[in-house]
Amino acid sequence: MENLKTNFLAKTSDADVKCAIIHYLNRDIAGNKPVVAKLKVDYSQEEYDAFLKLLDFEYDDAAYFDAEPLKATIWLKNGGWIEKDIYSRDWDYHQPPSYKRCDEQSPF
């Protein structure tokens, strides 16, 4: 079992979070209702604290093929993002895309 708030804070400790959405379905939480935690752009400290409070529960990350799917996308201010897919145990960091001029990329 893992704590979702702890995982979120560990994954974002070196990042500047722009916004986030986390969706989790667990049959034992709130009578089968999914936990949906959203952190909007330009959030306040109070909104951030409320977001973290929603994430403060234990979940079984090994159950990703059972009835406890977790999906998360955390957008960062540097243009990158952190993503957790329901079929993966890993949280993947994606670098911001590099925008080069088309003529610099041309193989001709």
Image (cartoon, rainbow, N blue to C red):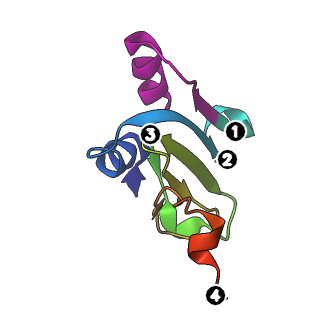
The Cα atoms of the two marked residues, 4 and 3, are separated by: 51 Å
Do the residues bearing badges 4 and 1 touch, measured as CB atoms within 8 Å?
Answer: no
Q: Which residue is rendered at x = 73% and y = 36% of the image?
A: 33
**Residue depth check, mark 4 versus mark 1: number of the one nearer the observer:** 4
Q: Are marks 3 and 2 in contact (CB under 8 Å)?
A: no
User: Nearer the N terminus, badge 2 or badge 4?
Assistant: 2
Q: Which residue is mark 2?
A: 25
- Where is residue 104? Give x, y as percent: 56, 72
Q: Which residue is mark 3?
A: 57
Q: Compare marks 3 and 1 and give the one earlier in the sequence.
A: 1
Between disc 3 and disc 2, whose residue precedes? Answer: 2
Amino acid type for the residue under numbered disc 2: Leu
Per the model, the C-alpha gap separating discs 2 and 4 is 47 Å
Q: Is residue 32 part of the magenta span, yes or no?
A: no
Q: Is residue 55 visible?
A: no
Q: Nearer the viewer, residue 14 or 60?
A: 14
Disc 3 to disc 2, C-alpha distance: 12 Å
- Is residue 53 rendered magenta in the image? yes
Q: Which residue is label 4 attached to? A: 107
Residue 87 versus residue 33 in the image, above or below: below
* N-term mark: 4 or 3: 3
Q: Are marks 1 and 2 in contact (CB under 8 Å)?
A: yes
**Which residue, given by chain and number where applicable, does mark 1 sit on?**
34
Residue 25, compared with residue 93, is above or below; it is above
- In three-dimensional space, the C-alpha distance between marks 4 and 1, rounded to whole angstroms, equals 48 Å
Amino acid at the residue labelled 1 = Pro
For the residue pair 102 and 98, the one nearer the viewer reads as 102
Question: What is the secondary structure assignment of the residue under circle 4?
Answer: loop
- Mark 2 touching mark 4, by CB under 8 A? no
